Amino acid sequence: MRLLPLAIAVVALGACASAPHGEFYGKNLAPSSSDMHDLAVVWVDGQLVFDTSVKPVVVGANITQELEPGRHELQVRAIAPGKPPLMPIALTVEPCTRYNFAAKDTVSGLIAVAMGETPIPGCKR
């Protein structure tokens, strides 16, 4: 009898883990372009998710951020030489969708640019 509550809890947790989500992906999808850089997510909806004052922003650092469906306000930082400024991104997330972004060097500085959307492999709505 003691196993029944445990089994129910495991099933409930499994259902939560498989809920459809969206994803911010800050990997530069045009690596041959020298003016493009990866992006690291630093803030999501006012909550710090990657403390760049403690952890260096290096290649591969927090470039993927899982997000619940709905509207989100992100602050991202380019993985580039120096200490690039934070850049805001407003994003409305759909289930099972990956939003690809990168940072681009311009004459006025770095900007975040959308690189398209792709389905998240294995995600079911």
Image (tube, grey):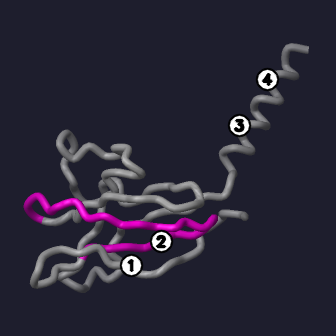
Where is the C terminus found, in terms of image quarters? Answer: bottom right
Q: CA distance from mark 4 to mark 3?
A: 11 Å
Pick whichever of labels 2 and 1 is earlier in the sequence.
Answer: 2
| Residue linked to disc 1 | 114
Compared across the picture, whether 25 is left or right of 70 comes to: left
Residue, disc 3: 13
What element does badge 1 sit on? strand
Judging depth in this view, the residue of 14 and 106 nearest the camera is 106
Name the mark nearer the viewer: 1 or 4: 1
The kind of residue on which mark 3 rests is Leu
Return the mark for residue 99. Answer: 2
Give coordinates of residue 77: x percent, y percent: 24, 61
Crowdedness near tag 4: few (<14), some (14–19) or many (≥20) residues, C-alpha within 10 Å:
few
Seen at 8% across and 61% down, the residue is 82
Q: Nearer the viewer, mark 4 or mark 2?
A: 2
Q: Nearer the viewer, residue 108 or 38?
A: 108
Residue 24 in the image: above or below residue 115: above
Is 12 displayed left or right of 47 in the figure? right
Task: Give the image quarter of residue 4.
Answer: top right
Q: Position of residue 93 (x, y in %)?
A: 54, 65
Q: Amino acid at mark 4?
A: Leu
Query: Which residue matches tag 4?
Result: 6
Q: Marks 2/1: CA distance?
A: 8 Å
Seen as rendered, the residue at the extreme right is 1
Could you tell me how far apart the alpha carbons at marks 1 and 3 are, in whole angstroms? 34 Å
- SS for dot 3: helix
| Label 4 element class | helix
The answer to whether the residue labelled 2 contacts the one labelled 1, judged by CB atoms less than 8 Å apart, is yes
